[in-house]
Amino acid sequence: MVQSLIDSPANLNGSDQLPDHAVEVRNLVKVYGHGETSKLALKGLNLDIPRGSIFGLLGPNGAGKSTLINIMAGLVLKTSGSVSVWGRDVTSDPRGAKAAIGVVPQELNLDPFFTPRELLDVQAGMFGVPRAQRRTMEILEMVGLADKADAYARALSGGMRRRLLVAKAMVHSPPVLVLDEPTAGVDVELRRQLWEQVLLLNARGVTILLTTHYLEEAEQLCDRIAIIDQGQLLACDTKDNLLNKLESKRLVITVEYLPNPLPEPLSKFQIRIVGPDQLEADCAHGDGSAMAVLDGIRAAGLTIRDISTQEAGLEDLFLRLTSHKEST
Ligand SMILES: Nc1ncnc2c1ncn2[C@@H]1O[C@H](COP(=O)(O)OP(=O)(O)O)[C@@H](O)[C@H]1O
Ligand SMILES: [Mg+2]
């Protein structure tokens, strides 16, 4: 029964030709407002989201994640550049692009007086899904809300509402499902349920794009990850490649006495002062650079009291890439 939900991704184009990229973003610029108060939210973004992937979009608040998602969904107008969803350009074929994408918004914006069944019917009507083709109960079953089909939305728990929003985003069987910070403020059990659904949909052929602050989740769930900050792409790669790049070791070195600034010979190393007697150095994996750093520190006349290493994870990269946000 749920199986039929995946018919559409393959059939949406009316041919067997599937796009390699579920979403393509080219030189995308977004300026909100005019004049002095204008805000450059996206600064020429390029991004390909492979069909069938679970793609994670990471970035701090204000990075431009929702702006990007809303442009894809036809909810916000771009300033320049291009975006296509499932091969349909959002500007020249807005209806086609909209039909290919379902968005679960950040806010739980549900009309409390609709029942899940009514809500999905209204949504299906909005997308022009003919009555005979509606799969209201099937979708409610998929998100585990079949027994709540006729309950008022206000009677649903937060978790149920979130699942109802997933159902709402899926009424027109889009091949691309976007979840904007779906687990912000959501408890552990609900998060698990939500990920189960996401994985299920993905296994059935739906391309998933999600934004999240939970880096562990991106590590667990996504096969590709892009990091954006201040409207710019900082990194985009497979999860494995990103993690491999991060195989670099971080050395934390405690010294007897730490001169500030550091002796000049140490400027050729990537060394930072992180405490009254502590230094931090990033060293590539297995290339001897860790030894070079330690030798350099000793040669500069410092006495090393302790050394520890820290494997850098994705979270670490993320923090490093975006840490300037915290200092402003
Ligand atoms: N409607 C709007 N009008 C003006 N500025 C906006 C609007 N929406 C977002 N912005 C600004 O654009 C930037 C990106 O916002 P947003 O896309 O919501 O980021 P994120 O989702 O990553 O937190 C922020 O600086 C935000 O203040
Ligand atoms: Mg947002």
Image (cartoon, rainbow, N blue to C red):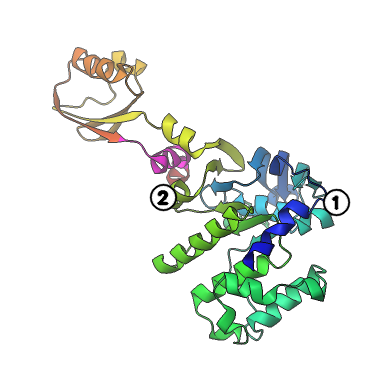
- Circle nearer the N terminus (1, 2): 1
Q: Which mark is residue 93?
A: 1
Mark 2 secondary-structure assignment: helix
Q: Which residues are magenta?
A: 311-324
Residue 5 lies, with reference to residue 134, above or below; the image says above
Q: Residues within 10 Å of mark 1 (few under 14, many from 20)?
A: few
In terms of image quadrants, where is residue 6? Answer: bottom right
The amino acid on which the numbered mark 1 sits, given as a three-letter code, is Asp
Residue 222 percent location from the top left of the image = 51, 47
Q: Residue at x 79, y 67 (%)?
A: 127
Look at the image and tell me whether residue 101 can be seen.
Answer: no
Choose between 239 and 129: the one closer to the eye. Answer: 129
Q: In the image as oriented, which residue stretches furthest toward the right? A: 92
Which residue is drawn at the image coordinates 49% and 61% (left, top)? 196
Mark 2 = which residue? 216
- Kind of residue sitting beneath label 2: Glu
State yes or no: residue 97 in magenta: no
Position of residue 317 in the picture relative to residue 64 (left or right): left
